Image (spheres, coloured by chain):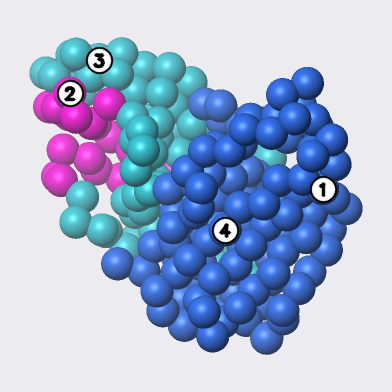
Chain colours: A blue, B cyan
Amino acid sequence: SQQGEEDPQALSIQEGENATMNCSYKTSINNLQWYRQNSGRGLVHLILIRSNEREKHSGRLRVTLDTSKKSSSLLITASRAADTASYFCATWVEGNQFYFGTGTSLTVIP
Amino acid sequence: ETGVTQTPRHLVMGMTNKKSLKCEQHLGHNAMYWYKQSAKKPLELMFVYNFKEQTENNSVPSRFSPECPNSSHLFLHLHTLQPEDSALYLCASKLAGGSYNEQFFGPGTRLTVL
């Protein structure tokens, strides 16, 4: 399988703290994307990092990519209650499809 | 809103029923996807359409039948489903041919098979 796997499966933090979640994948990739899903809703794209990039920022989000370890991390700084959601990494390998992981469920306690 | 709509949002059906899920996008995308999302499982890609042609069918049972009449509309026809088919069915679209293009997801149809 070429699926990504997120770690941890669930994370609970206090508002204002930072949240870090990790993604590991199995094969070489062109890029890796992170998506967020609010309960029972569709996924929303957050950020994309290319295979030749090591770090990328977007607002309170910071993504790193280590292709030698086949892993990526998503850091959300100064978390808010509205950040409560599931977060998925998606890898693009060949063809026209993404492979998604099982997700990290983040709960931010006000 | 992402620009991708799905109807119905909720569907309850018996195992002998026939129903259809509809997905619509007016984002100018030319690739459309059906995913199945079950609890504690990775998002499962079911079908991919590029320029209205089916390019992927990930070993999906024949009780699921996709249809893509044009680049803006995608259907998933359902018949004689099983209780284990209960899940959130997500439609997504993107510009084809670019691995750096993001997917835009609809809100999903929550399907319950009795």
Residue drawn at (43%, 48%) of the image: A102
Question: What is the crowding at mark 1: few (fewer than 14 residues within 10 Å), some, or many (at least 20)?
Answer: some
Looking at the rendered structure, which numbered label has been put on residue A77? 1
Question: What is the crowding at mark 4: few (fewer than 14 residues within 10 Å), some, or many (at least 20)?
Answer: many
Write down the residue under mark 2: B83
Q: Is residue B78 visible?
A: yes
Residue B99 location, x and y as percent? Answer: 58, 73
Q: Nearer the viewer, mark 1 or mark 3?
A: 1
Q: Secondary structure at mark 1?
A: loop
Q: Give whichever of discs 3 and 2 has the lower sequence position.
A: 3
Write down the residue under mark 3: B13
Whole-angstrom CA distance, mark 3 to mark 2, is: 10 Å
Residue drawn at (19%, 56%) of the image: B59
Write down the residue under mark 4: A22
- The relative height of residue B15 versus residue A104 in the rendered view (above or below) is above
User: What span is in magenta?
Assistant: B61-86
Looking at the image, which is closer to me, B51 or B1? Answer: B1
Q: Quadrant of residue A26?
A: bottom left
Q: Nearer the viewer, mark 1 or mark 2?
A: 1
Q: Secondary structure at mark 4?
A: strand
| Mark 1 belongs to chain | A
Q: Are marks 1 and 3 on the same chain?
A: no
Q: Horizontally, is B94 left or right of B40 in the view?
A: right
Looking at the image, which is closer to me, A59 or A97? Answer: A59
Q: Is residue B31 visible?
A: no
Residue A83 location, x and y as percent? Answer: 73, 35
- The relative height of residue A86 versus residue A57 in the rendered view (above or below) is above
Question: What is the crowding at mark 3: few (fewer than 14 residues within 10 Å), some, or many (at least 20)?
Answer: some
Amino acid at pointer 1: Thr
Looking at the rendered structure, which numbered label has been put on residue B60? none
